[in-house]
Image (cartoon, rainbow, N blue to C red):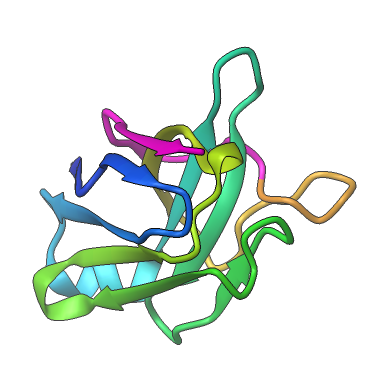
Amino acid sequence: VQLVESGGGLVQAGGSLRLSCAASGLTSDDFVENYAIGWFRQAPGKEREGVSIIYNSDGRTWYANSIKDRFAISGDNAKRTVYLQMDSLKAEDTAVYYCAARYTSRWPEDGRGNPMNLASFWGQGTQVTVSP
């Protein structure tokens, strides 16, 4: 299984970007019925953190509080692709964004309800830089 991210780049604060995560090596049925896709990010000097999760089978989503109402996750199951629309970007959103896939109906959470960095597969990451 491979996950390939795209769409990162440099944008001014207040701008928008859309990240894509294309999955290959999975059948469409497997992708839809058995996998959740998550976006995580890691800023310099910080731990990787969960940003958003989508469960392909029923469209359930989860968002980190820091990006709620600014980011939107969506999926195109036929294309086995998940998108992260990022609006009203802030300098603190600067990070490497990673796509992750987990064979699960519920992504494991830490004690604060955030998804843990436990994935079946990871993408290579895409840099998002937001200038002040």
Front residue of this view, candidates 52 and 17: 17
Residue 121 point in image, percent of width and height:
34, 38
Looking at the image, which residue sits at the far top?
45
The picture places residue 72, in percent across and down from the top left corner, at 46, 73
Q: Is residue 9 rendered magenta in the image?
A: no
Coordinates of residue 120 in the picture (x, y in percent): 41, 40
The answer to which image quadrant residue 66 occupies is bottom right
Asked whether 98 or 33 is in front, the reply is 98
The quarter in which the N terminus is drawn is: top left
Q: Is 127 within the magenta? A: yes
**Quarter where residue 107 is shown:** bottom right
Above or below residue 49? Residue 73 is below
* Left or right placement of residue 77 versus residue 130 in this view: left
The magenta-colored residue range is 116-132
115 horizontally vs 27: left or right: right
Q: Where is residue 58 in the image (x, y as percent from the top left)?
A: 45, 87
Q: Residue, x 38% and y 59% (percent of image)?
A: 15
Quadrant assignment, res 57: bottom left
At 66% across and 49% down in the image, what residue appears? 115
